[in-house]
Amino acid sequence: MAYTFLLMYRKVILFTIGTLLCCSIHAVGQGLPYKQDLDTLLHALQDNYPSLYRFHTPAEIKRMYHTYAQQINATTSRRDCYKLTKYFLSSLQDGHLGCTPPDTLKKLFDEEEKIFPVAMVFLAGKAYVDCDPSGKLPVGTEILSINEKPVAGIVEKLFQYIVSDGEINSKKYRILDRNFSFYYQLVYGPHAGYHITYRDIRGAVAMVDIYGETRSHLSCTNHLQPADTPLLVFSYPQPHTALLTIRTFAQDDLEAAGLDFAHFLDSAFHQLQQQDIKALIIDVRGNGGGRDVYGALLYAYLTDRPFRYYAQLSTTSRLLTAADHPNLAMQQPQAANFKGKVFLLTDGLSFSVTSEFCAVVRSHRRALFIGTETGGGYCGNTSGSFKEVLLPYSHISVAFPTVRYTMAVQDNGKMKRGIIPDYEVTPTIGQLISHRDMALELALEKCQF
């Protein structure tokens, strides 16, 4: 579920802060418990989260805190507190932050509240039906409004509660593809029914009413989500062109699938040297990250020169050295490095380690990017080991990373953004229904020799 923060790629350290309730220096108003919870969170971030001031000044963080604290009053519920915590974390502009509600709220969200039952995908800012369990809205129908509110305004509002690096929206759209009903439920509340204005595939505008459903009873088969594919694939889709598909850098997932990442790369790039390959397409769409060193290793096969990968790693207490992390040392090229043309396919789910790799590729101008903006930032991210704070009164759990990563990249003037593609490709709804891969098609077209 969207409310569950899955720590897929980094080590988690759990600790609980309770003593701050009696010694807070930030408590405001009557010191209501939920305000003290927010106080607890801020103290934990100040002490252990190294990127609190990465995109905001201390004065801005202080103003943000007081703005949020003033919204808490005697009528504030645990549900309200969770919503406010999500909003606060999103404001920090870090896609690695996570927030999990207590079991009582999970039960409310899953088993008691009636949610919007239609699954949707978002293309070029528009919402299209992926699955409607009522059968009233065919796949590909464009949703124009829900309960008299235009979809564009709904999306803008929901974005305020979804964490993402910097000012990147591409990842937020992909999160809504999978979790629109949850965020709509969180922000707009549950409804027994939903009044929908839509545009059908012929262009006619009409309206329909559908009943809400509890999440635990909802059953829907998605038609437009990307299909599951093997984690690592090396192929030759056309003459003189190779395709390297990397769906994850997560060592645990790779080992569970019986894959050795280093061996896979070594084999693939040695084959490239033996074949008449002039262009390499690397597909890292949907790759949410994993092991840091795998990103540096992959770039080492694309260059014939030593290179810097990380410029700096830091915690709230110290700077890390190459003895702490090998990616801080000067990196050496692999002997079987590829010297031909390179194309990179990216999307909003290209995140964390994947965005680090993409950032170095972009900084060295080693490839042309095709697709959509990466979900992770160009300048770096905050990840590494995680700490988890259990807020004492609400029992909301907040997980945050403890290492600030700064990439060794040239300043491109867009340090709050991800890697923006040279060729932005968004499929039409018709192409998506037909399962055409427009980004790959364009890459293959540019590899014609």
Image (cartoon, rainbow, N blue to C red):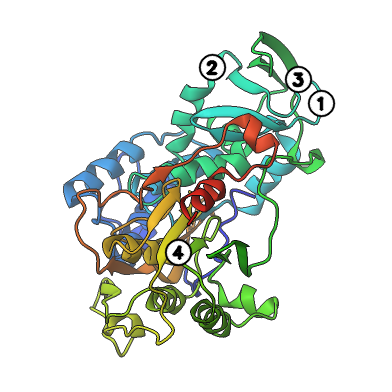
Label of residue 354 in the image: 4
Q: What is the secondary structure assignment of the residue under circle 3? A: strand
**What is the residue that sits farthest to the front in this orientation?**
449
Find out whether the residues at labels 1 and 2 contact each other: C-beta distance under 8 Å: no
Label of residue 149 in the image: 2
Disc 3 residue type (three-letter): Ile
Disc 1 residue type (three-letter): Ser
Precedes in sequence: disc 1 or disc 2: 1
| Gap in angstroms between the C-alphas marked 3 and 1 | 7 Å
Residue assigned mark 3: 210
Residue 246 in the image, given as x and y percentages of width and height: 56, 66
Q: What is the secondary structure assignment of the residue under circle 1? A: loop
Residue closest to the eye, 30 or 434: 434
Precedes in sequence: disc 3 or disc 1: 1
Q: Residue at x 68, y 42 (%)?
A: 435
Residue assigned mark 1: 134
Residue closest to the eye, 52 or 374: 374
| Gap in angstroms between the C-alphas marked 2 and 3 | 16 Å
Q: What is the secondary structure assignment of the residue under circle 2? A: strand
Residue 170 in the image, given as x and y percentages of width and height: 45, 43
Residue 33 in the image, given as x and y percentages of width and height: 44, 47
